[in-house]
Amino acid sequence: MKFQKAQAIVEFAFVLPLFLLFMVGIIYFGFAFADYLMLNNTARSIAHEASMTKDAATRQIIVKNNIKNVYLTSDIFKWEPNRESGINNAYLEVKNENNDVVVTANAPYNTNSYFGRLMRNFGSKSALKGINIKYTMYCPNSGGGN
């Protein structure tokens, strides 16, 4: 009887670290997915609103208003758009192509984060750059150009 109790404790000691690692992985996957959804919704919202105007200054205000309170849940990705001016940078770009508004959102892996480095080093080749979202929306008010 005593050996059975000891056996259960040993089995528990072997299984617990694996279970905790699995749970942390699920939690961080949830954080990464929440970040993806946040950027996806932000890019779609900007593309939709920007397609209804043809003035570049108004589009800049739309971008500024839409990204003002957008912060990512986790530290896996780096997201630093120009919140003050709404001008295009490496993280968020809004431009016109023919009669379309194209919004590109990029959130590379954060190299200061353990999980960001882990994903960058051991992720698949297609996912090595982090989150990359591109929305193209038809703009009937646009005259083309940038």
Image (spheres, rainbow, N blue to C red):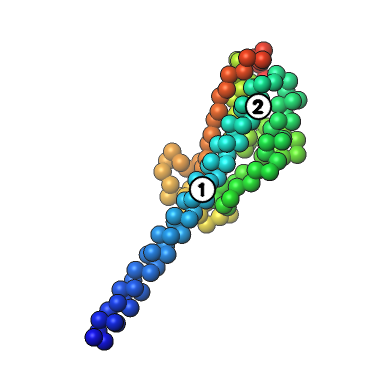
In this view, the residue farthest toward the bottom is 2
Task: Please provide percent x and percent y for residue 21.
Answer: 42, 62
Q: Nearer the viewer, mark 2 or mark 1?
A: 2
Instruction: Name the quadrant of the N terminus.
Output: bottom left
Q: Earlier in the sequence, mark 2 or mark 1?
A: 1
Above or below residue 36? Residue 11 is below
Mark 1 falls on what kind of element?
helix
Residue at 68% x, 36% y is: 66
The answer to whether residue 45 of the structure is visible from this angle is yes
Q: Amino acid at mark 1?
A: Ala
Above or below residue 103? Residue 32 is below
Mark 2 falls on what kind of element?
helix
Residue denoted by label 1: 32
- In the rendered view, does 84 fall on the left or right side of 45? right
Mark 2 and mark 1: span between their CA atoms? 26 Å
Residue at 57% x, 36% y is: 41
Q: Amino acid at mark 2?
A: Glu
Above or below residue 68? Residue 113 is below
Task: Please provide percent x and percent y for residue 109.
Answer: 54, 46
Res 103 quadrant in image: top right
Residue denoted by label 2: 49
The answer to whether residue 106 of the structure is visible from this angle is no
Crowd tier of the residue under label 1, counting other residues whose Cα lies within 10 Å: few below 14, some 14–19, many 20 or above: many
Q: Which mark is residue 146?
A: none
Above or below residue 15? Residue 55 is above
- In the rendered view, does 97 fall on the left or right side of 2? right
Residue at 58% x, 39% y is: 39
Which residue occupies the foreground of this view, 48 or 100? Answer: 48
Residue at 62% x, 44% y is: 79
Marks 2 & 1, CB-CB < 8 Å contact? no
Instruction: Name the quadrant of the C terminus.
Output: top right
